Amino acid sequence: MTTELVQLSFNGPIATIVLNRAAKLNALNAEMLAALETYADELDRNQEVRVVLLAGTGKAFCVGADIYEWSDLSPLEMGRRWIRDGHRIFARYARLPQPVIAVLNGYTFGGGLELALAADLRLAAEGVQLSFPEVKLGIIPGWGGTQRLAQLIGPSRAKQMIFSGERVAAEQAETWGLVNEVVPPEKLAEQALELARTIAANGPVAVQLTKQLIDAAFPASGDSGVVLETLAGSLASYTADAQEGVAAFRQRRQPQFSGR
Ligand code: COA
């Protein structure tokens, strides 16, 4: 499955995936998820590729799951399909043999941040904002965010970000270890490529083994975390609060949550 909305290109040993739905700030729909999965399969088998870059076009890296798409699903379908699809596909990137670098050019929200967290490294342009705004919609980060964020920056800061839904600037995110490096926007692509080239010049087997060893020391989300997140995501989508959150987003107003 391929689509214009996600593009894969090769430059020597470096593969670049670009989320290309700028008009919707690269919000991820089912078509894009399917393309991401196809590309993960291809990259996993391609031994010529030594580093994978994940990038976005326009003013966002990715603002998360397409609210218009998932809000039409029943809670059962959310759990059976949408949430499970995201978990499976993002895990494919986390487990690619090659290092994956997320290149954050703009808004990195919700599922976009979850995708970036599935990468091994994150470079961000100055001023980029990162957030998990899900609770502002009455739902939860359901594509590994609760697990991977806490693993990466610790439970306390993860809770602050997830409970508040507030945006964190890349500069702050860097001090938390959420972002590896912050660079001027005009240098972002070049710097990402330079880092990719540096890694690609090293022994690929050695690099890939070290990725697996470090991941083995820090298992981001065990099976139980994934199952719990799937159940919690389905439950949250069933609530009156989630309906109110989505309605408020569509109507561009503040939600009035009732706790039901
Ligand atoms: N899903 C689907 N569409 C989305 C989207 C999402 N997560 N986020 C933005 N869009 C769409 C908007 O509906 C709009 O489409 P339209 O022009 O056809 O109306 C377009 O992308 C541009 O978004 P807009 O809100 O007009 O841009 P902005 O610069 O004013 O605001 C954000 C940018 C990121 C602050 C705002 O779009 C936002 O809060 N998005 C939701 C983020 C979110 O909650 N993500 C988690 C989803 S589970």
Image (cartoon, grey):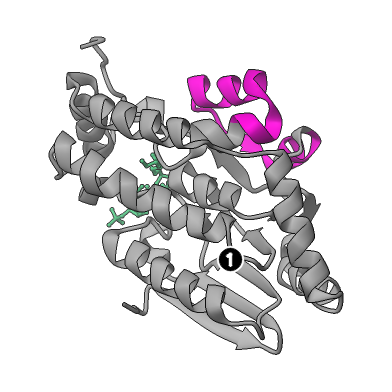
Q: Residue at x 46, y 78 (%)?
A: 7
Span of residues in magenta: 150-175
Q: Residue at x 22, y 44 (%)?
A: 80
Q: Residue at x 48, y 78 (%)?
A: 42
Q: Secondary structure at mark 1?
A: strand
Q: Determine crowd level at label 1: few under 14, some 14-19, many 20+ residues with C-alpha closer than 10 A.
A: many
Q: Is residue 185 above or below residue 201?
A: above
Q: Position of residue 176 (x, y in %)?
A: 75, 33
Would you say 179 lies left or right of 254 here?
right
Predominant secondary structure, magenta span: helix
Q: Quadrant of residue 172?
A: top right
Q: Quadrant of the C terminus?
A: top left
**Foreground residue among 93 and 68:** 93
Q: Is residue 39 above or below residue 147?
A: below
**Foreground residue among 61 and 70:** 70
Q: Residue at x 54, y 78 (%)?
A: 45
Q: Is residue 168 magenta?
A: yes
- Give the amino acid at mark 1: Leu
Q: Quadrant of residue 191?
A: bottom right
Q: Is residue 191 visible?
A: no
Q: Position of residue 222 (x, y in %)?
A: 52, 36
| Residue identified by numbered label 1 | 54
Q: Quadrant of residue 155?
A: top right
Q: Is residue 85 above or below residue 219?
A: below
**Foreground residue among 229 and 113:** 229
Q: Quadrant of the N terminus?
A: bottom left
Total marks in image: 1
Would you say 145 lies left or right of 245 here?
right
Tell which residue pokes out farthest to the top in this image: 259
Would you say 106 lies left or right of 6 here?
right
Q: Position of residue 186 (x, y in %)?
A: 74, 68
Tell which residue pokes out farthest to the bottom in this image: 12
